[in-house]
Amino acid sequence: MKLPTRFTLKSLLLLVALSAVLLAWKALELRRQIARRAIVADIQMAGGHVTFAEDESGKPIDRVRRLYLANTKLEDSILNRLWLLSESPVVSFNSTSFSDAQVHYLDDFDNLTELKLNGTRISPDGIRHLSEKHDITRITLYHTTFKADDQQLLIELFPNAWEIALPGIRPYLR
């Protein structure tokens, strides 16, 4: 029994459309991986580094564990692409020009648990922008505009923090 040509053409068209969707998805994933490698290389060229998680055998896997931008010149070309590494739970901007105007670059960091902002230009106004990051358990703010009086504000903004380090006082340990 021969199938009608019309049925066969519909099936072929559906198969082609499905294949196109799968290829487009794979192409987007490949493009994302290339962009991630490019930003990691740019961070390393700027003097920072990215640490990746490892599997049981010690082989690195494609999940960022730590993002260190300490002592680097923060350029918009890097900051604009930080979202590509937003799964990192630890971010360090120590001794950089990181300021209130740049806090929004951390918006996509939903897993952020540790934030190091020692020696930056961050202020209490800028830190308020991060108040949605309830998973932050450790934040260090030595050599910033923060004062001992700001400790209570930080305790309220980051209720899960077990360490809040400010200049001039002992670290708050829960």
Image (cartoon, helix red, strand yellow):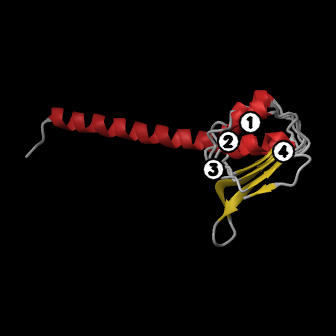
* Residue 31 percent across, percent down from the top left: 60, 39
Marks 2 and 1, Cα distance to the nearest angstrom?
A: 9 Å
Viewer-closest of 149 and 94: 149
> In the rendered view, would you say 162 is above or below 145?
below
Residue type at mark 4: give it: Leu
Classed neighbour count for the residue bearing mark 3: other residues with Cα under 10 Å, few (<14), some (14–19), many (≥20) = some
Residue type at mark 3: give it: Asp
Residue type at mark 1: give it: Ile
Of marks 2 and 4, the one in the foreground: 2
Classed neighbour count for the residue bearing mark 4: other residues with Cα under 10 Å, few (<14), some (14–19), many (≥20) = many
> In the rendered view, would you say 140 is above or below 132?
below
**Residue 141 bears which disc, if any?**
4
User: At numbered mark 4, what does the secondary structure look like: helix, strand or loop?
Assistant: loop
Discs 4, 1 touching: Cβ within 8 Å = yes
Discs 2, 1 touching: Cβ within 8 Å = yes
- Mark 1, residue position: 127
**Does 4 sit left or right of 78 as displayed?**
left
Q: Answer with mark 3 or mark 4, whichever residue precedes in sequence.
A: 3
Marks 3 and 4, Cα distance to the nearest angstrom?
A: 17 Å
- Mark 3, residue position: 135
Marks 1 and 3, Cα distance to the nearest angstrom?
A: 14 Å
> In the rendered view, would you say 76 is above or below 18?
above
Q: Answer with mark 4 or mark 1, whichever residue precedes in sequence.
A: 1
**Residue 157 bears which disc, if any?**
2
